[in-house]
């Protein structure tokens, strides 16, 4: 039996329900379930999963001070997502830009958490 590695990231928000709406409506995640005091003491909120089949989960955890953080999310088409999110009214921080990892742009949620959408690219000269 082969087991796949699961990747988790905690995102702290003041209002988990609003963060859940942002993640599902705009960033392509779906609500995988809820976290409660029964699951892990001190942690309650929602668990969201990437729609594209990889095992990447984000725990939207409620915390009053909601520290700002940046989280990178992979996309298969950065430009498509940039224009789609802009048309949906999501404020993008600047235009897509090339980095050593690929093409990326940044959006922020209502809590000030930033999400970097990255289309990974290989710039090596290998043929």
Image (cartoon, rainbow, N blue to C red):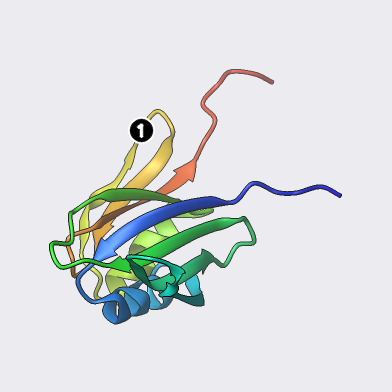
Of residues 91 and 108, which is closer to you in this image? Answer: 108
Q: Is residue 28 visible?
A: no
Residue 79 in percent (x, y) is at 41, 55
At a point 18% along the width and 66% down the height, the residue shown is 111
Of residues 87 and 56, which is closer to you in this image? Answer: 56
Can you tell which quarter of the image residue 90 is in? Answer: bottom left
Q: Is residue 6 above or below residue 21?
A: above
Of residues 16 and 52, which is closer to you in this image? Answer: 16
Residue 86 in percent (x, y) is at 28, 68
Apparent side of residue 61 relative to residue 48 in the rendered image (left or right):
left
At a point 32% along the width and 59% down the height, the residue shown is 11
At a point 28% along the width and 48% down the height, the residue shown is 70
Which class describes the residues within 10 Å of circle 1: few (<14), some (14-19), or many (20+)?
few
Residue 37 in percent (x, y) is at 39, 73
Can you tell which quarter of the image residue 99 is in? Answer: top left
Residue 92 in percent (x, y) is at 23, 60
Apparent side of residue 54 relative to residue 116 in the rendered image (left or right):
right
The residue that mark 1 highlights is: 99
Instruction: Assign the C terminus to one quadrant of the image.
Output: top right
Apparent side of residue 84 relative to residue 2 in the rendered image (left or right):
left
User: How many numbered discs sit on the rendered protein?
Assistant: 1
Q: Residue furthest left?
A: 65
């Amino acid at each position: 039996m082969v087991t796949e590695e699961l990747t988790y990231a905690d995102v702290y928000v003041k209002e988990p329900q609003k963060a859940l709406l942002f993640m599902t409506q705009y960033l392509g995640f779906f609500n995988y379930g809820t976290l409660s005091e029964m699951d892990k003491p001190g942690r309650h909120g929602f668990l969201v999963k990437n729609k594209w089949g990889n095992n990447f989960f984000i725990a939207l955890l409620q915390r009053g001070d909601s520290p700002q953080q940046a989280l990178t999310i992979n996309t298969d088409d950065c430009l498509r997502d940039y224009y789609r999110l802009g048309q949906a009214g999501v404020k993008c921080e600047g235009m897509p830009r090339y980095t050593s990892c690929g093409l990326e742009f940044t959006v922020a949620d209502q809590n000030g958490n930033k999400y970097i959408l990255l289309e990974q690219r290989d710039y090596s000269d290998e043929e």
